[in-house]
Amino acid sequence: MAGRETMSSIDRAWLMMDDPTNPMVINGFWIIRGQLKYEQVLAVLEERLLIHDRFRQRVVEHRGSFRTRTYWEIDPEFDLREHVRRVVLPLPRDRKTLSDTIARLLSAPLDLNRPLWTFTLIEGYEGGSVFFGRIHHCIGDGAALVRVLLALTDDSAEGARPAEAAGAGSSPNRNPLRPPTRATDRPGYAKLPQGRKRAGQPAYLLSLAARGGRLAGKFAAVLAKLALMTTDDHTAFKGEVGVGKAVAWSKGIPLEDVKFVKNTMEATVNDVLVAAMAGALRRYVEARGDDPQGKEIRAMVPVDIRGPEDTKLTNRFALVYLPLPIGIADPIDRLLETKRHMDAIKRSPEALVTYQAIAGLGVVSDRIARSVRGYYASKVSVVLTNVPGPSQKLYFAGKLLDTIVFWVPQSGSIGVGISIFSYGGQVNIGLITDRGLAPDPDTIVTAFQEEFENLFYLAHVQELQARRNAEPA
């Protein structure tokens, strides 16, 4: 049909995973040092975000006798101001007020008759601004959206678009005197860490599948594992979920400290952070009167499988199931067990199998897709993701972008989302929970910070012991 673009099966799969209690929406915010000007924010978004047609398109569906066809269509009534709101943070304008405000904003459904995204300029936090965004997962995955959003930034305050051009934001039409900039030319595209491992590239994964005979057994084993997976151990994180959410985020942890632990313990950055979070979840379970000893809970972990040159705004990731060893009390033993699980997943073709399975959901009926989604959501307690960001601090609309936090969406009955993001030499953890299951995620974040400090201390002890052992008698 003229003017319409067919939605890919993989993007449609994420659209179909929407649920009133768990919208498939990625939420996040930037803490800005300084007061953003609303009109200038509009100008930046029009120049750098709206070059992607996806942000001016709405979703339309045509239901036939046998299948539903889903399309992207330019919204004829698109108005940027309808998607960018502004609020003043209520007194006392502290961290709790901000978390409560964001929890309220992210619990509201997106308007399905409009492009599926919104931003809110929150004014008054610590004398500066917070730029809060919500983007539906069907538009793109975390890796793709990070690239798009970082393209809104500059390397310096002087790189921002001048304020006198701000009035253009009120119109869906681009200013003809300012030709649109290609997204890949924006500074943010050069700021993401490079060097993705070969095992994470689609071509490599597909080559594994093409070997047929030798790997057929492994693929069959993965399918059997997924089909026979038992329901997750019952903890405070399992139960009926509702609409209300609670959010929290950590203070920045120096990335160099995390690297020190991983080098000393011969692990990875991800191993260290996940092990610390497993310890925090263990503490929370204990505080709720449950005995975590010997228990594991599963985390659903997105795995980016796009190649280095793949910058298309879509979903290009798979899901793997990672056991979190909350039943292990010793921090080092817990780290080693986390590493063992991580290494096993890296050697497995599980990511390729789940990617193909998710794409398959996008071509079946809504009823079948929701049934499959519910089945696998019951097998896990947590969604956990780690997205690396730029190493240097950036500027947005002329102001310093101090902190980046986001929250991964959950699916079906999953009540906890854990997001790890590194930026400017710091690592931040974003935690979102179902308010009925875990109403106080800030206690989990505090426990995570303490668990990391324990690992940091133990790594120093281990390094000191190694130095002593290396000294001549």
Image (tube, rainbow, N blue to C red):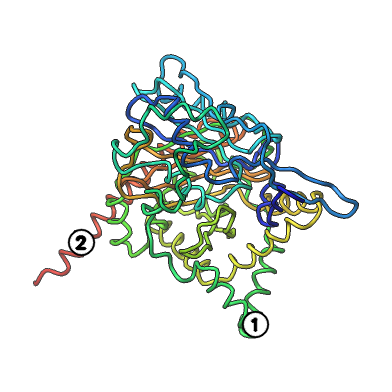
The kind of residue on which mark 1 rests is: Gly
In this figure, which residue is indicated by the disc labeled 2? 465
Residue that protrudes farthest toward the front in the picture: 177
Marks 2/1 in contact by CB < 8 Å: the verdict is no
Q: Find numbered disc 1 in the image and state the secondary structure of the residue it sits on.
A: loop
> Which disc, if any, is residue 212?
1
The residue at the point 53 percent across, 63 percent down is 305
The residue at the point 91 percent across, 52 percent down is 65
Q: Position of residue 157 (x, y in %)?
A: 29, 36
Closest to the observer, 139 or 172: 172
Closest to the observer, 468 or 156: 156
Write down the quadrant of residue 228 in the picture.
bottom right
The kind of residue on which mark 2 rests is: Gln
Q: Residues within 10 Å of mark 2 (few under 14, many from 20)?
A: few
The residue at the point 68 percent across, 50 percent down is 378
Closest to the observer, 465 or 32: 32
Q: Find numbered disc 2 in the image and state the secondary structure of the residue it sits on.
A: helix
- Tell me if 280 is positioned left or right of 237 in this view: left
Tag 1 or tag 2, which sits nearer the N-term? 1
Q: Position of residue 175 (x, y in %)?
A: 49, 36
- Tell me if 217 is positioned left or right of 395 in this view: right
